[in-house]
């Protein structure tokens, strides 16, 4: 059984496999519309969420599956003091896969100890957020055309921003990437991640000025100051407006630099920047749903399965060509055909629905 707790649970080959699958899902969503029929995803969100929870749910529905869960610790038995392990053990009886978010770091690692189904970490405190990284990787692949040899500026709350931690871990495994870590001194990337970068000889630099660094980046990843993780209100108020990306700063940036943000934004990106074609943060939202579809399929071992599309009703008045087929005589029996999308042209699999087979007698319709 596979879980996704941190992005390093997936090899680089598997990340590439997911990106490839996502590209296919994006192009042919219909081919995946029934893959999860009869399966249930539980979303256990002990912490607020808009995009992550709803994109998981939309992904599962679009795969033909169903969804159950809760969207706040107060509406679950956590409010009565139930442990994460007991909650997850219970939910394993109801669902085939679990996506969970929790304010405490490491909560999903506790969850897998009692889960009998795959668990996906949808964010644990200020620790990891691997599925946001999947969205970010798809964004970089689509918008920059590659995941290597990129100069990436990460800006804002790099201490508590879990999306930053997971993204660094993922991109550090691709060759030639360089990280510019732009934050106030108090909100620098945790020492453990810095040490890993040093050990792996990954190029990085810590900086404080967005204006100075923005001029040479391939991608700028803005983040929100994570108010809920601060122990002191004064400290938050002092740091909350550390960086605001506006049109003026965008004028300093390269023409092909993309702006990313996991969202929600508070005020670290001026809304006027939304008009700039380099702004990619709402594209990230869409890519996140597609990557979550690929991930659900992978964890439930359905990614490699040859699609077996359900029979389709042909509306052009077609009837089965086989005179001995039951559908030619049986009253009230609707003609149904299976399209075959996967054909091989000169050894290359393509997905052109060229062939149809009768759903009753299985004869190819020529
Ligand atoms: C992020 C998160 O929850 O860590 N949001 C998200 O999932 N897209 C970023 C944030 O809350 O700042």
Image (cartoon, rainbow, N blue to C red):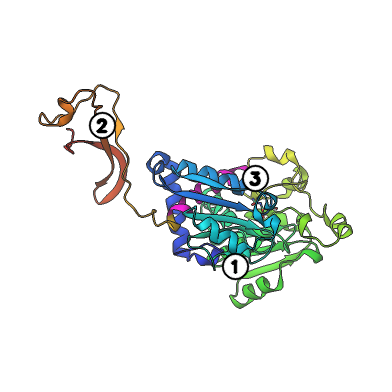
Q: Is residue 108 visible?
A: no
Q: Circle 3 is placed at which residue position?
A: 50
Q: Secondary structure at mark 2?
A: strand
Disc 3 crowd, CA 10 A, few/some/many (<14, 14-19, 20+): few
Classify mark 3 as within 8 Å of ligand 1 or not, answering yes or no. yes
Q: Quadrant of residue 240?
A: bottom right
Which mark is nearer the camera, 1 or 2? Answer: 1
CA distance separating discs 3 and 2? 40 Å
In-front residue for pair 104/139: 104
Q: Quadrant of residue 32?
A: top left
| Most common SS among magenta residues | helix
Residue ID at (26%, 31%) = 336
Q: Circle 2 is placed at which residue position?
A: 336
Q: Secondary structure at mark 3?
A: loop
Which badge, 3 or 1, comes first in the chain's sequence? 3
- Residue 83 place in picture, x, y as percent: 64, 63
In-front residue for pair 277/364: 364
The magenta-colored residue range is: 280-297
CA distance separating discs 3 and 1? 24 Å
Q: Is residue 281 visible?
A: yes
Which badge, 3 or 2, comes first in the chain's sequence? 3
Q: Are marks 3 and 1 in contact (CB under 8 Å)?
A: no
Classify mark 2 as within 8 Å of ligand 1 or not, answering yes or no. no
Above or below — where is 320 with respect to 128?
Answer: above
Which mark is nearer the camera, 3 or 1? Answer: 1
Q: Secondary structure at mark 1?
A: helix
Classify mark 1 as within 8 Å of ligand 1 or not, answering yes or no. no
Disc 1 crowd, CA 10 A, few/some/many (<14, 14-19, 20+): some
- Residue 212 place in picture, x, y as percent: 76, 57
Q: Which mark is residue 110?
A: 1
């Amino acid at each position: 059984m596979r879980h996704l707790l941190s992005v390093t649970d997936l090899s680089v080959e598997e990340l590439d496999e997911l990106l490839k699958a996502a590209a296919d899902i994006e192009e042919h969503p219909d081919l995946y519309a029934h893959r999860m029929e009869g399966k249930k995803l539980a979303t256990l969100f002990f912490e607020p969420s808009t995009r992550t929870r709803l994109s998981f749910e939309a992904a599962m529905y679009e795969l033909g599956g169903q969804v159950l869960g809760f969207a706040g610790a107060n509406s679950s038995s956590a409010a009565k003091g139930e442990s994460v392990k007991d909650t997850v053990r219970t939910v394993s009886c109801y669902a085939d896969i679990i996506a969970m978010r929790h304010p405490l770091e490491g909560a999903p690692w506790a969850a897998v100890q009692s889960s009998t189904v795959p668990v996906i970490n949808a964010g644990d405190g200020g620790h990891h957020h691997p599925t946001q990284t999947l969205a970010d990787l798809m964004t970089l692949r689509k918008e920059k055309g590659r995941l290597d040899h990129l100069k990436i500026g990460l800006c804002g709350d790099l201490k508590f921003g879990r999306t930053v931690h997971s993204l660094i871990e993922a991109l550090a495994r691709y060759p030639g990437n360089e990280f510019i870590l732009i934050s106030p001194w108090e909100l620098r990337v945790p020492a453990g991640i810095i040490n890993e970068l040093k050990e792996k000889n990954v190029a990085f630099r810590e900086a404080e000025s967005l204006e100075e660094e923005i001029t040479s980046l391939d991608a700028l990843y803005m983040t929100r100051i994570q108010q809920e993780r601060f122990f002191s209100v004064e400290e938050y108020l002092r740091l909350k407006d550390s960086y605001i990306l506006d049109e003026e700063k965008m004028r300093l940036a390269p023409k092909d630099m993309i702006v990313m943000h996991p969202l929600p934004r508070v005020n670290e990106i001026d809304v006027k920047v939304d008009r700039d074609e380099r702004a990619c943060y709402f594209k990230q939202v869409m890519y996140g749903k597609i990557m979550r579809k690929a991930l659900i399929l992978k964890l439930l071992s359905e990614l490699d399965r040859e699609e077996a599309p359900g029979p389709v009703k042909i509306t052009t008045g077609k009837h089965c060509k086989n005179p001995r087929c039951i559908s030619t005589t049986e009253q009230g029996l609707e003609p149904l055909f299976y399209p075959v999308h996967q054909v091989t042209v000169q050894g290359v699999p393509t997905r052109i629905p060229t062939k149809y087979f009768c759903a009753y007698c299985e004869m190819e319709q020529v």
